[in-house]
Amino acid sequence: MLRKLLISVLLGAVTTVVLADDANIAVNPDEGKMGEVKRVPKDNEFKVCADQNNLPYSNSAGEGFENKIAELLAKDLGKELSYQYWPDRFGFLRNTLNAYRCDYLIGTNTTYDALNTTKPYYRAGHVWVYRKDKGYDIKDWTSPDLRKGIIGVNDKSPVAVALNDNDLMANARPYRIQRDLNQKPSELIDDVADGKIDIAIAWGPIGGYYAKKSDVELVVVPIPEYENTKITGKTYWNISGGVRKKEDERRDELEKAIFKNKDKILKILDDYGIPHSDPTFNNTLDGYKRHKQ
């Protein structure tokens, strides 16, 4: 998930130098590196911020489901698709969208307040993943089979709340919540297939995609929403497109294209094995007034 980065600002103002071609060199830390030529977005480009090695979302070969959604939207808008790639970790927004190196995010949390987001077009949650040959029957947190093996889970993720509430922490094996770039994005699901852990609790797009690609037959079970039990254990989130703050016109254009092509977008999700449901608005974490209209 995209995160904010607190920046220590040594310079209190923006200084610009006009070059021969009238480009501006920005030294505002919110707009990229000091002394770097600031890109001015063009009307005919659809420049997307993405991670170059983060399947199933995106990669530099254009193989991710967000790559395919971007292709669909660019074509609908009659614009030329291009990317600014950057690892989706701390500093992602600072080095991409807020540096004006790109203008669109294909998928983000609807209420991520660092962005101006469209109405949500799908909802994603967490899943249990396990080998079919285990014979498990897991439907909810009270299922006895959850106590039979090692459960892999991203440390300090929301599902840890339900694990703790249901006395399952003794079964848990923690994985880093921020992916180690030396490890494949499929690490958690690979460990299930290889028998290193018995059950994975994974973010739905990760679990569904890599389970579908696995050479071992894996079972993917959506985890029931836990927010009604404890809001800090919320496991489902609405997903929207995003642009820079205050760029309402760009947001509305993106939103119109998304919903014009929503059936095709959902087909892409299905093709990639991404579990999804319709957006819902149970609390303010799911969207604000404009998202619900």
Image (spheres, helix red, strand yellow):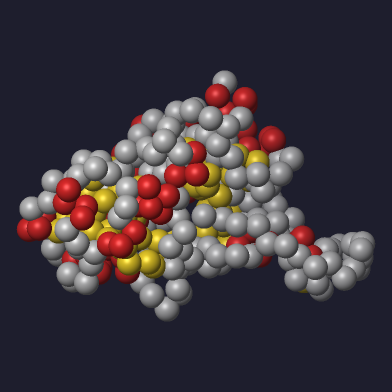
Residue 222: x and y, percent? 28, 43
Residue 165: x and y, percent? 37, 47
Residue 88: x and y, percent? 53, 63
Report the residue that reaches farthest toward the top.
Answer: 293
Residue drawn at (10%, 58%), measured in percent from left and top?
134
Is residue 97 left or right of 167 when viewed as pictured? right
For residue 219, above or below residue 119: below
Is residue 192 left or right of 132 when viewed as pictured? right
For the C terminus, the quadrant is top right
Quarter of the figure with residue 269? top left
Residue drawn at (22%, 49%), measured in percent from left and top?
220
Does residue 82 show up? no
Report the residue that reaches farthest toward the front.
Answer: 167
Front residue of 46/122: it is 122
Does residue 52 show up? yes
Front residue of 56/150: it is 150
Residue drawn at (24%, 64%), measured in percent from left and top?
150
Is residue 77 left or right of 113 when viewed as pictured? left
Quarter of the figure with residue 254? top right
For residue 245, above or below residue 176: above
Residue drawn at (81%, 73%), measured in percent from left and top?
35
Residue 82: x and y, percent? 54, 58
